[in-house]
């Protein structure tokens, strides 16, 4: 072990080993983990433990990312918290001596074998990004080494030209290569294949599903316990007009503006039964005159792409990880354990934060607490023996923000699953209607976000906006379900009989609204009214 000394600058630690052996130096690793990384990692936007108290950091794995003599280190860090849980993160590091390369994400000034330099997050270094791309480009088809690069069939690039960051992100870091490809470096990682990598490769390579970015390559490592850990995923860069969330917000603003512009009498608008399928041609002319035809045509197209995704995911009978399954007792036990734990967590959160709420939000929060036994009973009323549909691998965190708009069509992305779920939970096969329920909750959010953000600009009362929004919501769901169910049934994917489908949608939407409640109570309590409205609406349904 080399002893840490000081260089000319007394504050810079010195290690008398070459960079290629630095991670083998126990003195460096001890100092790096205890004195440097704890402070550094807590400042990073991709760090997910900000609401917990860090206890200590351990280095569980490290590996070299290299090409010829060019060497970087990939670190797998275990962050332990005082609340008795831990998370794993990926951090690649580089040693640079040129100050121009060390302007972003400096981790530590250090002297390595007499040379002063800086350790930085390697993703900030173009040379590192180029190396990863070139290793994927030149990878062997059946890589059996510990650090495994894989090239997808869809990769048509022949050489590296340029790279740049995609933009501000939370949990991962994405880099655009040659303005044609995107490498997503996963920051929080798991001891298993990342579902985004697994699903992308399956849909793109095996099923030829065109409405998701094409899989182009990946970087995985085999850890000391022989688990596959996904470090990076490379996909096609899809030119687009933004995500469907922003797109739908613009649509909703125009729809609500039409109430006054066209003199719509909200109390005269025909209503529609929730979850009742509705062909587009049967949407009443009063609704079309108000909301326009295009929003329903786009909902139909979104339903079509969603159905095609589920059909692709449900048509595999050779690969066990994707083969459809029927409901059983094991799934019911898993689901209820998960739902009840999450529900109790939300009850505690609401009880502890009632003082932050007022008005309608406070009223609904108290209603939520008063009705907890009835909600718990709804969750309990899940009997797998009455369900005849199939479970498949699903998107798992499906909402408008996970859909890109491209020339009137939709591209589905980000198959990582819900952030709160474990990696194993994300790989559990679930009813495809759970994805549909997530999207319906997103429609509800878009309606209420428009009312909250623009209500004062619109020449309609708040009551009229809410009433009109709920009417529109039911028609959007009806049109979506008609197209989606029609395509699913034509492909012989079993999503159950009508009563079962309605039960599954109600159950999944209630579960999703409870999930959303936790985020809103912690991040923006005034918006908790949206999931609380959703919970009340579902509970009040006969």
Image: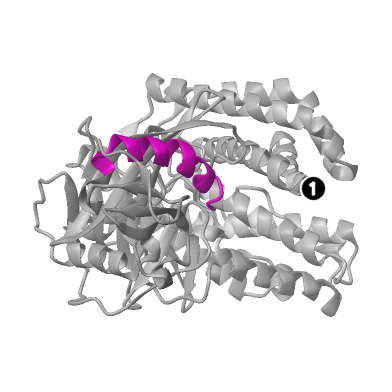
Does 382 sit left or right of 359 as displayed?
Answer: left
Indicate whether residue 29 is drawn in magenta. Answer: yes
Circle 1 residue: 526
Name the dominant secondary structure of the magenta segment.
helix
Residue 112 placed where, x, y %? 30, 53
Res 89 → quadrant? top left
What residue is at 55 percent from the left and 66 percent from the top?
A: 244
Q: Foreground: 389 or 443?
A: 443
Q: Quadrant of the C terminus?
A: top right
Compared with 245, 518 (above or below) is above
Q: Quadrant of the N terminus?
A: top left
Residue 450 placed where, x, y %? 74, 63
Part of the protein shown in magenta: 23-44
Q: Foreground: 28 or 132?
A: 28
Number of residue marks: 1
Q: Is residue 473 visible?
A: yes
What residue is at 27 percent from the left and 43 percent from the top?
A: 23
Indicate whether residue 247 is drawn in magenta. Answer: no
Does 236 sit left or right of 103 as displayed?
Answer: left
Looking at the rendered structure, the secondary structure element under dot 1 is helix
Residue 502 placed where, x, y %? 56, 40
Residue 461 placed where, x, y %? 91, 63
What residue is at 51 percent from the left and 49 percent from the top?
A: 436
- The colour scheme used here is one colour
Q: Is residue 537 visible?
A: no
What residue is at 61 percent from the left and 68 percent from the top?
A: 246
């Amino acid at each position: 072990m080399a002893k840490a000394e000081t260089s000319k600058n007394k504050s810079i630690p010195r290690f008398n080993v070459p960079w290629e052996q630095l991670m083998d130096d126990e003195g460096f690793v001890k100092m790096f983990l205890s004195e440097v990384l704890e402070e550094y990692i807590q400042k990073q936007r991709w760090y997910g433990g900000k609401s917990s108290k860090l206890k200590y950091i351990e280095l569980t794995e490290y590996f070299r990312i290299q090409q010829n003599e060019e060497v970087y280190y990939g670190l797998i860090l275990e962050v332990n918290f005082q609340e008795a849980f831990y998370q794993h993160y990926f951090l690649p590091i580089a040693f640079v001596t040129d100050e121009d390369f060390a302007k972003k994400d400096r981790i530590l000034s250090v002297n390595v074998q007499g040379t002063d330099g800086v350790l930085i997050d390697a993703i900030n270094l173009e040379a590192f990004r180029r190396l990863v791309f070139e290793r994927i480009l030149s990878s062997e088809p059946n890589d059996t080494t510990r650090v495994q690069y894989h090239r997808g069939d869809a990769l048509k690039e022949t050489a590296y030209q340029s790279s740049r960051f995609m933009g501000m992100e939370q949990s991962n870091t994405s880099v655009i290569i040659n303005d044609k490809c995107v490498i997503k470096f996963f920051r929080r990682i798991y001891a298993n294949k990342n579902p985004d990598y697994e699903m992308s490769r399956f849909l793109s390579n095996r099923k030829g599903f065109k409405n998701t970015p094409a899989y182009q390559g990946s970087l995985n490592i085999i850890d000391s316990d022989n688990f596959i850990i996904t470090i990076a995923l490379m996909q096609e860069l899809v030119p687009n007009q933004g995500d469907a969330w922003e797109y739908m917000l613009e649509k909703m603003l125009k729809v609500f503006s039409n109430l006054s512009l066209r003199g719509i009498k909200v109390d005269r608008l025909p209503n529609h039964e929730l979850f009742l399928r509705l062909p587009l041609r049967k949407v009443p002319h009063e609704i079309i005159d108000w909301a326009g035809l295009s929003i329903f045509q786009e909902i139909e197209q979104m339903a079509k792409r969603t159905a095609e995704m589920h059909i692709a995911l449900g048509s595999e009978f050779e690969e066990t990880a994707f083969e459809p399954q029927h409901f059983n007792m094991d799934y019911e036990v898993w689901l209820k354990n998960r739902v009840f734990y999450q529900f109790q967590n939300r009850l505690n959160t609401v009880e502890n934060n009632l003082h932050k709420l007022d008005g309608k939000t406070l009223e609904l929060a108290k209603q939520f607490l008063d009705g907890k036994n009835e909600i718990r009973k709804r969750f309990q009323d899940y009997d797998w023996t009455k369900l005849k549909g199939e479970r498949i691998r699903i998107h798992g965190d499906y909402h408008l923000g996970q859909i890109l708009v491209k020339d009137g069509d939709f591209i589905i992305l980000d198959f990582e699953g819900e952030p709160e779920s474990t990696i194993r939970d994300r790989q559990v096969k679930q009813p495809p209607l759970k994805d549909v329920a997530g999207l319906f909750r997103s429609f509800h959010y878009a309606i209420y976000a428009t009312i909250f953000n623009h209500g004062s600009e619109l020449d309609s009362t708040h009551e009229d906006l809410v009433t009109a929004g709920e009417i529109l919501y039911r028609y959007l769901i009806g049109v979506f379900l008609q197209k989606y169910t029609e395509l699913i049934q034509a492909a012989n994917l079993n999503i159950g009989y009508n009563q079962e489908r309605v039960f599954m949608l109600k159950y999944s939407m209630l579960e999703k609204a409870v999930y959303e409640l936790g985020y809103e109570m912690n991040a923006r309590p005034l918006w908790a009214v949206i999931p609380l409205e959703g919970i009340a609406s579902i509970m009040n349904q006969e």
